[in-house]
Amino acid sequence: MAATSRTDDKLEDLRRKRGESQLGGGQRRIDAQRGKGKMTARERIAMLMDSGSFQEIDPFVVHQSTEFGLDRQRYLGDSVVTGYGKVDERLTFVYAQDFTVMGGSLSNAAAQKICKVMDHAVATGAPIVGLIDSGGARIQEGVDSLSGYSDIFLRNVRASGVIPQISAVFGPAAGGASYSPALTDYVMMVRGQGQLYITGPDVIKAVTGEDITHEALGGAESHASKSGVAHFDIDSEEACISAISLLLSFLPQNNMEEPPRTNARDASVVEGLTEIVPDSPNQSYNMLDVISRVVDDGGFMEVHASYARNIVVGHARIGGRSVGIVANQPETMAGVLDINASVKAARFVRFCDAFNIPLVTFIDVPGFMPGSAQEYGGIIRHGAKLIYAYAEATVPKVSVLTRKAYGGAYIVMSSKNLRGDVNYSWPTGEVAVMGAEGAVNIIHRSELRDAANPAAVRSQRVAEYQERLMNPYAAAGRGLIDDVIEPLETRPKIISALEMLVNKREALPPKKHGSIPL
Ligand code: HXC
């Protein structure tokens, strides 16, 4: 009897401790968090994971610091909830910072909890999702909290290209705390809640005199549209968590696996594509109208939708296979490649390549953006990133030229010369060094200067140039375009190209790593 009662006592003690650990910084703090319209760390995890699948790790960890009265502020589990579970039946590791414990600030103990799940994620080849809500390094701990961040950053970098890493920012991520999200593959931010900045408004005011709010400086919209730090800015916590699941559905568990495949196999022709490209070369159209007709069920998860809109990137499936789509967007700045578009697309191409996601590229690009702002900003260096990314990528690369492929931009966008595997063109495709007007002004300069009627000569020469060069057949005649296809055939052609390429193997020369022009 005595043994049983001792066991009972221990069980009761465990249950009491377990209950305490579930309360984070206490009910008053939980109420305050909810009062701000925010979910708690545990609620976020419960919403992300398949029902009942979450297994918590380290609920009894406490920090060991004693400075500044910290010994009187110990909470079971400290400021982060960690563990694993299933998202759509696939193993996923998670950590969620708990703002109710000292503002989610990162103690060394919290850092070690995060590192433990990151290590498990790498060892078992499963994605890691960080749900961020933190005042940054726990100030009272000094170097201990800083070294905690270092341990996380090191793991972020080592896990890069091995397992998918996703960060969702639900609250502040002040100071160095912003660098862990920045090192991961995807950053999502909740509008009106998520805030990322290196130095806050107070410091900025003191140093530069500039007056700016937290939201304008580091809110979701700023990072989604101005800095490009955030790939997604999302209206609510619920929508953000759904977006995490959707994103994971396109990704393999790790770099040694293929992305999951669905049963969508309909390979019939698609009406409505022929009418999209306008007759006039100067008229724009929306490339999303092409993409949505070609992908399975119109499902396209656009990445960086508000940033560098002259190029479109995102995840979709074609014939059930996960693909990364890269597409020039004629509707914004005529689809020209500038610095931001080059960097945006280059990063996406490298992500897809790292995770065995084939690339499907839709091309309508008048060239690189001219101007001193672009040249001084380093368009040569940044444009080179996109060349580098496409040239280095060994995943299947399929492209469709819908209209213009001019100049250097022709080369960049998945061209045959950069080892594009299958390159299609619509009959409206035009591969040329530059547009007709510009070309005629250069190559017929003296004739135009001496002509009695320069306008008539110019239009005749433009017509000749268009007739001879502004079509896909010169490229197709050299095998640089594999076939000229009717727009309605686009989807079945891509499906069969992806099928043909399914076992593609291509290796780069052995090296430690390349030296991408950063
Ligand atoms: C310790 C912290 C803390 C921190 C917040 N708290 N941040 N405790 N270390 N970094 C505590 C607060 O003291 C408070 O405790 C509780 O958390 C809630 O914070 P509030 O300020 O009441 O909340 P709110 O008004 O919502 O403001 C949140 C906040 C603000 C914007 C995050 O707390 C803030 O600015 N914190 C400091 C941010 C910061 O400068 N962090 C260090 C960055 S440097 P009580 O008990 O009073 O309620 C850094 C270096 C990393 O991170 C370097 C790695 C390379």
Image (cartoon, rainbow, N blue to C red):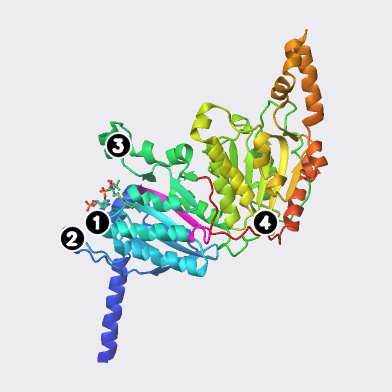
CA gap between label 1 and label 2 equals: 10 Å
CA gap between label 4 and label 3 equals: 47 Å
Residue 142: mark = 1
Q: Mark 2 sits on what residue?
A: 67
What secondary structure is marked by label 4?
A: strand
**Pointer 4 and pointer 2: residues touching (CB < 8 Å)?**
no
The residue lying toward the viewer, choosing from 187 and 389, is 389
Which mark lies nearer to you, 4 or 3? 3
Residue 308, compared with residue 503, is above or below; it is above
Precedes in sequence: disc 4 or disc 3: 3
Residue at the outermost top position: 452
Q: Amino acid at mark 4?
A: Arg
Precedes in sequence: disc 4 or disc 1: 1
Residue at the (36%, 65%) spot, across then down? 113
Q: Residues within 10 Å of mark 1 (few under 14, many from 20)?
A: few
Residue 261 at what x, y percent from top left?
65, 60
Residue 263 at what x, y percent from top left?
69, 59
Q: Amino acid at mark 2?
A: Glu
Seen in the image, is 515 located left or right of residue 316?
A: left
Q: Amino acid at mark 3?
A: Ile
**Pointer 4 and pointer 3: residues touching (CB < 8 Å)?**
no
Precedes in sequence: disc 2 or disc 3: 2
Q: Residues within 10 Å of mark 2 (few under 14, many from 20)?
A: few
